Amino acid sequence: MTRPRAGRPRAGRSLRTTVIGVGLTALMLFPVYWMINVSLTPQQDMRKSPPDLFPLHPTFTGYQAVLRDQLPYLATSLLIGVSTVVVTLVLSAPAAYALAKLRPRGSGFLGLSLLIAQMVPGIVMAMGFYGIFLNLGIMHTWWGLVIADSTLAVPFGVMIFTAFMSGIPDELTAAATVDGAGAWRTFWSVVLPVSRNAVVTVSLFSFLWAWSDFVFANTLDSGGDLQPITLGIYRYIGNNNQEWNSIMATAVVASIPAAVLLVLAQRYVAAGVTAGAVKD
Amino acid sequence: MTLAHTDRPPRSPAAFRATHRTRGPQAAVRCRRRRTQLTAWAFVAPLVAYLAAFYLYPLYRNLDLSLRHYTVRSFVDGNAPFSGWANFSQVLHDPTFWPALTNTAVFTVASLAFQYTIGLALAVFFNRRFRLAGILRALFLIPWLLPLIVSSSTWAWMLNSESGIVNHTLNLVGIAPVDWLTSPRWALTSVIIANIWIGVPFNLVVLYSGLQNVPAELYEAASLDGAGAWQQFRRITFPLLRPVSAITLLLGLVYTLKVFDLIWIMTRGGPGNSSSTLATWSYRLGFGTLLPQFGPGAAVGNILILIALLFGLLYIRIQRRQEA
């Protein structure tokens, strides 16, 4: 450790680190690359040994199959995702404002309930919803699925919003009160605009979770007129076990929201991942 | 008290005090506090109603399911005789119970051990300053963001016995092909490998942000004292990261116990019960066959909740202690 820390060696080391980093990332993302590669591989080359590492003769028949078979599923997923975002925001943002700034009696208990709610296995919720949905006659409806999917996101949403809104200085809300704004006006025109980052984070994750949900879709909507893309893929795997380029093409298309969100809102994603685990 | 229920709030604290002067400042404060309480509850009420209807009620229904003899017909005519602990006793004596329980344990522990170790190594690596570090770290998030059905079917194809890239690669280094998903010996290992891949990003991101709170001066001092990289890791990084590590592992534990989609899509818990966990077994009992056994399925689900809550409460305790 007597080596000098300044000077040229550092630049060299940094370049080497970058090369190692790129290598590690490539290794980690290999399955994603492989999914894309297989989605472009012609059906007759699928069982080739050894398989082509690059799509030398790319075919788009898989993607044509997606356009032919999967568009309704994709549209349904979009509808369910957006609706889940709306439900989650409407329920969690006002409640979080109260928990962070008005501190009603019992908010400690409520916070604890939300933490525990996140630990309930999805399969257990699915079974409970199954009985309820049968009784109410709302099985196989897209909005029933929105209700179920929202349970994945609401507790998380309240926690993100509460943490964020607690950080808003009291002077800001007090100033609004002095200007004559009621609690709702203060929330709507002061707190919510300031919490834009939290709104983005919560919307992102609730959309992604609803889009990715398989358990609820398969138990509560497997016979519905409107089914999400996760069931579209599941059917594909079940029915035409051999057409892996169509399956992988669907998988690629189903991954687009995740990719878009990562590109557009990278820092919010990281914020959401760490939210539950690290306290700043 | 009448003032507390008028539509418009007082214009300012001073004005509020002025209108309440006759009642004295204490009454005014109490009045305002009560008003705030009411407003607060109005904001929280929808959430509470929601939690009662869509969390508590399904959980209650699930408990009810597990204590009755249910068939598909029972849901329609409401006729399901109470059977006490019969479902639980049936499940506990089922030959699937022990394999499912041990598989759950193996799946969880192995996934966490590798996710955490790889995540920590990567976090330390990315903690160095180098070009592209930010972008590469963001790319590492992709496996965690992909829909589980996407990652599961991709892994299923990669691990395919005849045409999978994994067996082809093994073949290149002279290892005989492995029946990853179709042999009882390897099925559990296969789903664990896929689950590790999915969980590494979470560990990386959380541990990395934990590393940001380790003061840089500590490393400078240590390196002045002649401590090498490994010593710095063992004496500084790891001990200081312990609180974050505990939280990461416990949260990961609760999440991993719940894993269902991945295993169901890759192996359906098979062949036989070789990759069945409590979650997939519960699902198979309730939905996986033509003759659903809702009662026993719900019973398995409730056992799973119990285990998850046990560790969940431990997590909450540790987190509370760290905040205090």
Image (spheres, rainbow, N blue to C red):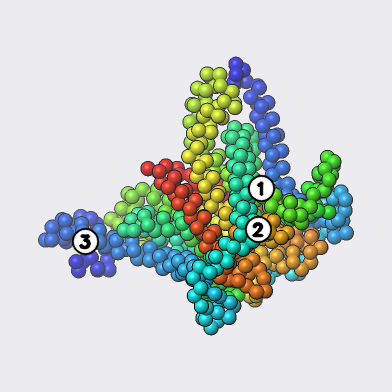
Q: Give the quarter of the image for residue B6.
A: bottom left
**In whole angstroms, how far apart are the C-alphas of marks 2 and 3?**
59 Å
Compared with residue A137, is residue B300 higher up or lower down, i.e. above or below? above
What residue sits right under mark 1 in the picture? B197
Label 1, residues with CA under 10 Å away: few <14, some 14-19, many ≥20: many
Compared with residue B183, is residue B116 higher up or lower down, i.e. above or below? above
Q: Earlier in the sequence, mark 3 or mark 1?
A: 3
Where residue A181 appears, as percent x and y from the top left, is 32, 60
Q: Residue at x 81, y 44 (%)?
A: B170
Compared with residue A95, is residue B133 higher up or lower down, i.e. above or below? above
**Label 1: element kind:** helix
Q: Is disc 2 in the same subunit as disc 3? A: yes
**Label 2: element kind:** loop
**In whole angstroms, how far apart are the C-alphas of marks 1 and 2?**
20 Å
What residue sits right under mark 2 in the picture? B276
Front residue of this view, candidates A9 and B259 = B259
Q: Give the quarter of the image for residue B97.
A: bottom right
Front residue of this view, candidates A40 and B50 = B50
Q: Is disc 1 in the same subunit as disc 2? A: yes
Is residue A181 in view? Answer: no
Q: Residue at x 67, y 74 (%)?
A: B290
**Label 3: element kind:** helix
What residue sits right under mark 3 in the picture? B31
Chain of the residue where label 3 is placed in the rendered structure: B
Where residue A209 appears, as percent x and y from the top left, is 58, 59
Label 2, residues with CA under 10 Å away: few <14, some 14-19, many ≥20: many
Q: Residue at x 33, y 61 (%)?
A: B40
Front residue of this view, candidates A65 and B124 = B124
Quadrant of the snapshot with the N terminus of chain A? top right
